[in-house]
Amino acid sequence: VPVAALVRTEGAPTSIPSIVSFSAQSTAISVGRAENNNVVLNDRKISKVHCRMTLRTCKRKGSAENEVMKRLFIRDSSTFGTFVNGKSLVKEQWVMLQDGDVVGLRNPHGNASLGEYRVKYQDGEGGLQDLTEGTGEGQPGQPEASAPPREETAEQKAVRKAPAAVPEPKAPAAPAPQPSTLDFGGAEELSPLEEEDGAGPA
């Protein structure tokens, strides 16, 4: 069960996954330009390994010993900087992320709302219910590239509701290594084509 997630912001590139979830089984990701990162953003202002995020168990201040919480920590390792709520992080130093924080991979020039991902926690405001329902959360910690964002765009709704939709997902007999129309930058193992092939008739 996911305990934390990064949710793509409206202004972020659509090439990055809409949701990246973290759980007890999947606790760390790397973000950057190189193809071997969990989240790949091909931009010349993005370093090969731009930043790393990890889920850690923390004790709440002033709470009983057994009262713990899971929180995401981020560490910048980039040339041009990683930003939280518009402020640049100190390089190579772990910083705890709060519910609602906006993580920016490119310089937002002090504008806190300009960032690629917003942080959400299961125990935060609103929880993660609306994010994980029907999103293929079986692979927590991996970019949820195949899961449609909870709020669909008008274009996605039109494609989904089109009566004469092209039966593209059923065309390939073998699992496709990459999505045929969308590039999610290295998250092809969660492509919708593979999911439907496995679930449908052989």
Image (spheres, rainbow, N blue to C red):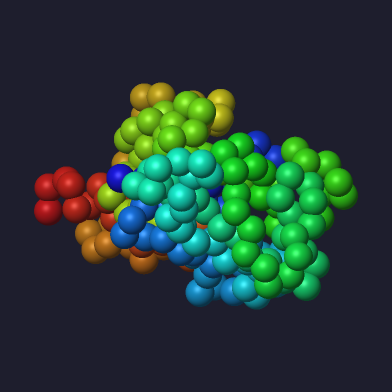
Report whether 164 appears left or right of 156.
left
Where is 78 relative to 16, above or below?
A: below
Q: Is residue 96 visible from the viewing direction of this image?
A: yes
Q: Is residue 190 visible from the viewing direction of this image?
A: no
Q: Position of residue 97 (x, y in %)?
A: 60, 49
Where is 151 relative to 189, above or below?
A: above
Report whether 125 appears left or right of 135.
right
Of all residues, the one furthest to the left in this rendering is 202
Between 77 and 37, which is closer to the camera in this rendering? Answer: 77
Residue at position x 78%, y 73% in the image: 79
Residue 74, located in which quarter of the rendered image? Answer: bottom right
Residue at position x 65%, y 36% in the image: 10
Number of marks in the image? 0
Q: Position of residue 107 (x, y in %)?
A: 81, 55
In the picture, the quarter occupied by the N terminus is top left
Residue at position x 76%, y 65% in the image: 90
Where is 183 relative to 146, above or below?
A: below
Residue 172, located in which quarter of the rendered image? Answer: bottom left
Residue at position x 28%, y 50% in the image: 138
Between 200 and 76, which is closer to the camera in this rendering? Answer: 76
Q: Position of residue 63 (x, y in %)?
A: 45, 41
Between 4 and 15, which is closer to the camera in this rendering? Answer: 4
Q: Position of residue 12 (x, y in %)?
A: 67, 45
Between 126 and 169, which is closer to the camera in this rendering? Answer: 126
